[in-house]
Image (cartoon, rainbow, N blue to C red):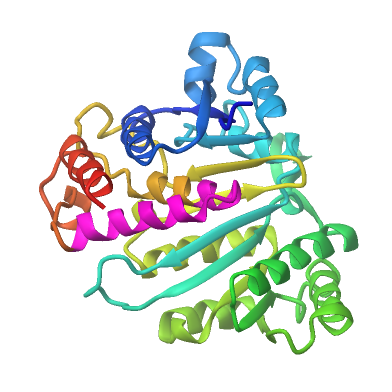
Amino acid sequence: MSNKIPATLIPGDGIGPEIVEATLAALDALKAPFEWDSQVAGLGGVKSAGDPLPPATLDSIRRTRLALKGPLETPLGGGYRSSNVRLREEFQLFANLRPARTIIPGGRYDNIDLVVVRENLEGLYIGHENYIRIDDDPQAVAMATGINTRQGSRRLIEYAFEHAVATGRKKVTIVHKANILKALTGIFLDTGVKLYEEKYKGRFELETMIVDACAMKLVLNPWQFDVVVTTNLFGDVLSDLVAGLVGGLGMAPGGNIGRDAAIFEAVHGSAPDIAGKGIANPTALLLAAAMMLDHVRRPELATRLRRAIDETLNVDKVRTGDLGGSASTAAFTKALVSRIANA
């Protein structure tokens, strides 16, 4: 019987293929158990299959229930819908897990270690939008409808609570705007508080916080937070804010988790301006691969990968330009693989 774990690989657009190549080199050095099925999406999907999310890619993820993907290009304004959003909807990936941990010390903030758990399928992100014509302007009024459900709120918050318990976290903060959006985010807040009272009281501390106050406190004193769980739009904003505490999106991995599938990714963009120059930082995707190893219950490999990343950056001081160094993607990868091999 094979010990290999089938997984879909989506190299993505822009710098995607470069950082995926670096990540595969590290996983190969670890002898990670993945058996890859390479597929395309985003702009690459449009070019090769006429579809930003080709049926073959969807079929592959349905089969493997596990994927690692590079950044996908999405046009601003018009064009096709985000493939990232479509993937979340297609596989009901209701939880977006965004850990933030200080890897390179000495920045504006040190010793950051927190996680944002974002609802992935509801809120304003459902995309129910329309225009209303007034006189000769067909787009005089723009409207959007947001929907949060009791069921959707509960499954997301329960995931966050379970994650907190499993990883030994001490506090969970439910972030909302129920003082103004009393129904839309009130249902999320109410569901979370009731769930805590029913099943989790005493297992960790629970606090609730209005989103604007949370944003301010994350900047003033981020060490007061442990796990932040919130709705889709607020989570989109706060997870990038939290990434800024640890050096930016180049250090920010993400996992999109559902009952039947999980997709891990670098959350930064495709950076077409530096594509092909060999200077991209693969750290975010490498950290996403470590999350993927945790997900398939290979924590020993995940720990080795994270340790090798830490040592490459801080002991060997091999860093790409965005981290203040001068290493190419290839040079960083070579140093990382050497660390893994000699561990």
Between 262 and 153, the one lying in front of the other is 262
Report the residue at 45% width, 84% height from top. 223
Q: How many marks?
A: 0
Along the horizontal axis of the image, is 122 left or right of 171? right
In terms of secondary structure, what is the magenta stretch mainly? helix
Which residue is at a point 18% across and 45% down the rendered structure image? Answer: 335
**Placement of the N terminus among the 4 image quadrants:** top right
Magenta stretch?
Answer: 291-314
Front position in the image: 232 or 36: 36
Instruction: Give the x, y percent position of residue 215.
Output: 52, 76
Residue 146 occupies quadrant: bottom right
The spot of residue 106 in percent (x, y) is 21, 75
Front-lying residue, 154 or 289:
289
Q: Is residue 40 left or right of residue 160?
A: left
Q: Quadrant of residue 174?
A: bottom right
In percent of the image, x 53 and y 59: which residue is there? 98
Q: Nearest the camera: 278 or 132? A: 278
Specify whether residue 267 is in view: no
Is residue 310 covered in magenta? yes
Query: Does residue 81 appear in the picture of this structure?
Result: yes
- Determine which quarter of the picture holds residue 207: bottom right
For the point 52% across and 26% down, the residue is 35
56 sits to left or right of 45: right
Q: Position of residue 178 (x, y in %)?
A: 77, 77
In the rendering, at what x and y percent does residue 89 appear?
Answer: 73, 39
Q: Is residue 26 left or right of residue 298?
A: left
Q: In the image, is residue 55 above or below residue 275?
A: above
